[in-house]
Image (spheres, helix red, strand yellow):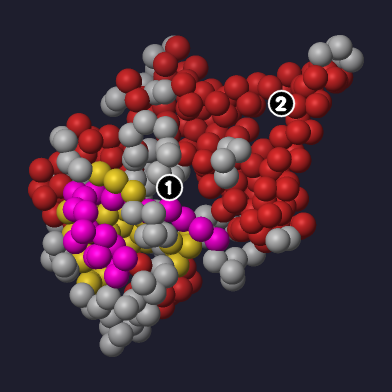
Amino acid sequence: MFFSIIIPLYNRPQEIKELLESLTKQTYKNFEVLVIEDGSVDDAEDIVNSFTDQLNVRYFVKENAGQGFARNYAFERAKGDYFIIFDSDCLIPADYLEIVNNSLAKNWLDAYGGPDAAHPSFTPVQKAISYSMTSPFTTGGIRGNKKSIGQFHPRSFNMGISRQVWEKAGGFIITRSGEDIEYSIRIHTMNFKIGLIPRAKVYHKRRTSLYQFYKQLHFFGRARINVYKFFPNELKAVHFFPAIFTLGVFFTLISNIFSWPIAILCNVIAVLLILLIFFHSLSKNKSVKIAFLSVLASFIQLTAYGLGFMQDFWRRVILKRF
């Protein structure tokens, strides 16, 4: 199997350096790398070119149009039997391609996704964010999980598709805002075999601050409604959970301000959730600091997603302003 690894890039030269360094350590060597500079001001040409003696890497520059169309640009130029998409803020374990190659040989998948995890080098904030995005106590519990609710939808930070999928389904039709969800659903409708490769994990940095994480998750909430425009039936009950959680937080605050009797029950529920997240994170990360930050990150994840979801649900579903 010859793999084409596709990495869209926008003003993140240091990230691509770390990602390419991780790819030089792959135990499976039959692959190429395509880096698509999507109209960056701070480009990474020199950094990418410094790896040409270690990797089969090609560097392209195009006008800024978003990560979805940058990936399409790479699909058109890729030589591989199978295309693998990574976000630029990922680190790839040395045995990643070997795991994928062996898995596809035993159980063919036309498209796959893999989970993400926190690398030991990540900051406490990054580890807390990683926890919140994979925790069973947040919506992260349905990502990269064998027991996920409904169909499994690969996400573009760690996703692979066969050349046959590209030839039949084409590329991304949304360049931002839920483009990977729409693409995954479209692949499903064409009856391709899709699944999770549980051991094909990447170390995903995501955001370096809680404020950046809030902005990202607010965007994700809005993106879910963007996908609704293409697939109305894919708006499931589980997608409303962050909005319900957010309304519950506001109700708890108001009930405490006005000393409503129900405030006691709301406070008990809130404390129980905080303790569950804290001790679960503590058991996984072995750090009180990360456990505390995990509580903050989890609440930020749910409320930011919930607010973004409600904003565009009201505008695009209720008012029908597309």
Q: Earlier in the sequence, mark 1 or mark 2?
A: 1
In the image, residue 115 lies in the stretch drawn in magenta: yes
Is residue 60 visible to the viewer in this orientation of the structure?
A: no
Q: At 76% across and 40% down in the image, what residue appears?
A: 275
- According to the picture, the residue beneath numbered tag 1 turns out to be 144
> Relative to residue 104, is residue 300 depicted above or below?
above
> Which amino acid type is shown beneath numbered disc 1?
Gly
Residue at the extreme front: 106
The reply, left or right, for residue 193 in relation to residue 229 is left
Q: At 64% across and 64% down in the image, what residue appears?
A: 123
The reply, left or right, for residue 171 in relation to residue 238 is left
Q: Which residues are magenta?
A: 97-118
- Neighbours of disc 2 within 10 Å: few (<14), some (14-19), many (20+): some
Q: Can you tell which quarter of the image residue 74 is in?
A: bottom left
**Mark 1 and mark 2 residues within 8 Å of each other at the beta carbon:** no
> Which amino acid type is shown beneath numbered disc 2?
Val
Q: Secondary structure at mark 1?
A: loop
- According to the picture, the residue beneath numbered tag 2 turns out to be 249
